Amino acid sequence: SSRKNRRDHFQAPSNIRRKLMSSGLSKELRTKYSVRSVPIRKGDEVAIVRGTKKGQTGKVITVYRKKFCIPIERLVREKTTGQTVPIHIHPSNVFITKLKIDKDRQRLLDRKAAGRKAGKGEKWGAKDLSAVE
């Protein structure tokens, strides 16, 4: 139900919030890695595709799992006191244009790509159907 889904979403522990805070990849990265989306992380470069800041790009400063948002470099507003504060954006409103890659992230991309390749985008493979018969 909607109520239980909302409860589970907002009470999710940090390891599950990581997956909830995923962003799509740009078309070039999608074709390069054969992966549609990955959990966002500090150091990724993103482009904003929704909201008033649409079209702007920058690097992710940090990932606030508690607030479900990411501040982006050079994306600030000025307070009445003159102090600048970062604007926070939900990861679903951005797409990743450049990934920060290390060995763990590369393994994640390889694993996801292998899964897509094995299924070739189909829900059921030929061997699955033969096993049913």
Image (tube, rainbow, N blue to C red):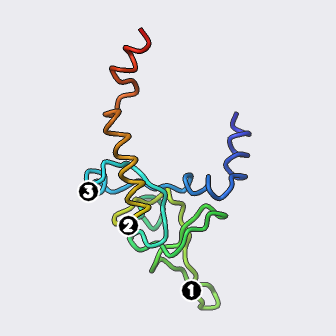
In the picture, measured across the screen, residue 34 lies left or right of residue 60, that is left
Q: Residue furthest top?
A: 133
Q: Nearer the viewer, residue 83 or 32?
A: 32
At label 2, which amino acid type do we have?
Answer: Ile
Residue with the mark numbered 3 = 28
Judged by depth in the image, the label closer to the viewer, 1 or 3, is 3
Residue located at (38% from left, 53% from top): 109
- The residue mark sitting in front, 3 or 2, is 2
Query: Residue at position x 63%, y 87% from top?
Result: 80
Q: Residues within 10 Å of mark 3 (few under 14, many from 20)?
A: few
Q: Residue furthest bottom?
A: 82
Query: Quick one: SS at disc 2?
Result: loop
> Of the residues shown, which amino acid type is indicated by label 3?
Glu
At which x and y percent is residue 72? Answer: 48, 73
Q: Sequence-wise, which precedes: disc 1 or disc 2?
A: 1
Instruction: Choose mark 1 or mark 2, whichever is in front.
Output: 2
Disc 3/disc 2 C-alpha distance (Å): 16 Å
The tag earlier along the polypeptide, 3 or 2, is: 3
Residue 2's quadrant in the figure? top right
Q: Amino acid at mark 1?
A: Thr
- Measured in 3D between alpha carbons, the distance from the residue under mark 1 to the one under mark 3, in whole angstroms, is 34 Å
Q: Quadrant of the C terminus?
A: top left
Q: CA distance from mark 1 to mark 2?
A: 30 Å
Instruction: Give the crowd class for mark 1: few <14, some 14-19, many >=20 residues within 10 Å.
Output: few
Mark 1 lies on residue: 84
Locate residue 116, reporting x and y percent. Answer: 35, 39
Name which residue lies at 39% across and 47% down. 112
115 left or right of 79 in image: left
